[in-house]
Image (spheres, grey):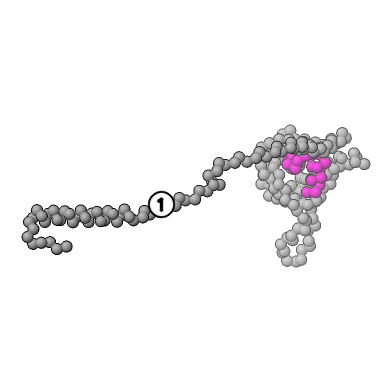
Amino acid sequence: MNVPDDLDEKALQELKEDRETANDSFFTRHKEDEPEPDPAPEPPVDEAAAAPPVPPEAAPPKPPAAAARPKPKRAAKAAPQTAEVAMPPAKHTPEPSVQFGPRIRSDLADRLNAFCADFDATKQDTVDMALAEWLARRGYPASPDIVVPPLSVPVDLTAPEPAAGGVPMPPRRSAIKRRQLNVRIRPETNQALIQFTTDHSSVIQDIADMALAEFLAIREQALQPANT
């Protein structure tokens, strides 16, 4: 657009304003003609998550369990009236005791199991009583009121030693099979046992063998008339 040179300042100012107004109208008109952008799509709704939780169906009540039948207890064999030897007590509440676990001969372990099963006695009480009698018979009573029955049955657990071959040889390994015995005995019996082993340099497993052999032999002899 050509502007004449002879226009004054006022006319130039009006012309400038008219030009700016025209430009503003042009841009405003074109901006209104532009299409508006599409709105952002909404995220899909999870109908399963939006739905309220359905309470689970109540399970049918379980039928009442049948009462377990009590197991019949095996009647303990009473000691024969003709036997004048003390028997170990029936099973009862354990008293303070210490661990005692030597390895004893297999034949003695079998006899001990059979004795406890026949008279409903525990190994703990039987072993403790056998040790107490054995120690008292040799002058080491575990308690002053212990009654020691006479040993009228020969008990020999010694094995013959092999003949010497002219040169010193170490002792042979014993062919006697043994089993582990894990019981608890009274503290006073354990104290008498410790004193005996200290005085005589004895081995615990040999003492356990002898004590059980004597104890069972006395009871088996006392019970023999009742079984015939």
Q: Residue 1: where, in percent of width, then height?
A: 16, 62
Q: Is residue 59 magenta?
A: no
Residue 13 appears in the figure: yes
Q: Residue 111: where, in percent of width, then height?
A: 81, 47
Q: Is residue 118 magenta?
A: yes
Residue sitting at 20 percent across and 53 percent down? Answer: 21
Q: Tell me the chief SS of the magenta region.
A: helix
Residue sitting at 72 percent across and 64 percent down? Answer: 169
The foreground one among 115 and 104 is: 115
Image: 38 above or below 54: below
Left or right: where does residue 76 sit relative to residue 100?
right
Left or right: where does residue 139 sit relative to residue 39?
right
The foreground one among 147 and 83 is: 83
| Residue numbers of the magenta segment | 109-128
Q: Label 1 crowding class (10 Å Cα cut-off): few <14, some 14-19, many 20+?
A: few
Residue sitting at 8 percent across and 55 percent down? Answer: 9
Q: Residue 26: where, in percent of width, then height?
A: 25, 56
Q: Residue furthest right?
A: 228
Q: Quadrant of residue 149?
A: top right
The foreground one among 83 and 33 is: 33
Left or right: where does residue 222 sit relative to residue 140?
right
SS of the residue at dot 1?
Answer: loop
Q: Which residue is mark 1?
A: 39
Left or right: where does residue 57 sit relative to residue 171?
left
Identify which amino acid the numbered label 1 is placed on.
Pro
The foreground one among 57 and 146 is: 57
